[in-house]
Amino acid sequence: MSESDDLFIREDPIFVNKELLEISHLPDEGRIVGRDEEIGQLANAVNPAIFGQSPSNVLIYGKTGTGKSLCAKYVSRRLVSTAEEEGIGAVFAYVDCAQDTTETQAAQTIASSVNTTETDVYIPDKGISTATYYKRLWRILDQEYDVALIILDEIDKLEDDAILMQLSRAGEAGKVTSCKIGVIGISNKIKYKDRMDERVKSSLCEREFVFPPYNASQLNEIMAARSDAFREGVLDDGVIPRAAALAAREHGDARKAIDILRYAGEIAQTKGADTVREDFVVQARERAEVDRFRELIRGSTPHSRYALQALTVLSLEQCDDAAADGNEGFRTTRIYDVYEQICRQEGTDALSLRRVRDLLKEHAFLDVVEQSRHSGGSAEGSYTEHTLLEDPAVVKDVLADTVD
């Protein structure tokens, strides 16, 4: 190919503003659909901050893609601007606890987020103790702000409750004297609160909200509001309704619905099509599911993957067995036998049965596996069965792709 030939597409024939379809994109006010009631409730909970008073601590539950993080960021951003109009110095910090899982990492992220060029406080990426990060954070807050909102997204991924204790009781403990701190915790796990320390639970869970999944109409509206990501006339009329119907029927997850729409556009690009057709939506859905699951298990330990692989092997065998019921679960001991075989194949020592049981519990917490307790009678006692919630063929392919 000569240098005069075009190697790159100079003008995207499908997308005009693809950023609108990225998960990280925070929509304008007019693009937040189907969450007026939830936004109103959240705003009411933190409203005292506008007057320099303590906002309520809030815990938000709901499945992924139900607008929890979106609404929390939107309300926090509006709170800061409204408070400033009232002469109140306000700030909010966002922590992704899936990335900052330790107390030290979370404390550093918060301190770095609220620090300004006007302060004389230095917040290094690492190299100082957790206690020092806290001391500098309290100093910044008291020096610069009247109110601070801290959003802890995927709060269930934190290693422990230590930072929740520090933030929720900073004022009471005299760590900060002039700045009021409010915490918004966000979790996909409705039972997360049951794991919390009782002292944290009493101070953090002042207000609790549950975000329900989106219905087909809301998903249709959400995607229609982002349709200007595409060039005019590129989307066939049935694309958004089809994507909304698929997403609503399966999960009600706006993120997945938007992913499907974006992937459908990318498939059109790959095929050199002039329009995004309805049949591309089904292909996009399959791609979105694989990518979502790959992201879910990315970063998991080898033995965590071996335990999941063992359950996958059993599930695939069940699918091939015409006499099998198709919904059968597998006991921990049976999974462990296959896990040991996989470890031998990989040339590594197997973990204990108890540790593998814990790894399966972690997969259950991520909604990859479903666990159920059964009674075997007086002779056998109770036991746990594990059922793979994902398509075993998809899991097999993803596990093969994520081998170290």
Image: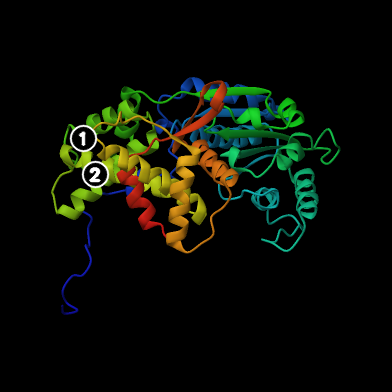
The disc placed on residue 264 is 2
- Furthest toward the bottom, the residue is 2
Q: Residue at x 44, y 62 (%)?
A: 346
Q: Going by the image, does 334 lie left or right of 85?
A: left
Q: Are marks 1 and 2 in contact (CB under 8 Å)?
A: yes
Kind of element beneath mark 1: helix
326, 290: nearer the viewer: 326
**Quarter where residue 40 is shown:** top right
Residue 14 visible in this rendered orientation of the protein: no
Relative height, residue 15 to residue 60 (above, below): below
Q: Amino acid at mark 2?
A: Ala
Residue behind mark 1: 239
Q: Residue at x 26, y 33 (%)?
A: 243
Residue 340 visible in this rendered orientation of the protein: yes
Q: Residue 192: give x, y in percent of width and height.
A: 60, 31
| Label 1 packing within 10 angstroms: few (<14), some (14-19), many (20+) | some
Q: Residue 320: give x, y in percent of width and height.
A: 25, 40
Q: Going by the image, does 261 lie left or right of 61?
A: left
Q: Amino acid at mark 1?
A: Val
Q: Residue at x 24, y 44 (%)?
A: 264
**Quarter where residue 4 is shown:** bottom left
| Label 2 packing within 10 angstroms: few (<14), some (14-19), many (20+) | many
Q: Going by the image, does 238 lie left or right of 122?
A: left
395, 137: nearer the viewer: 395
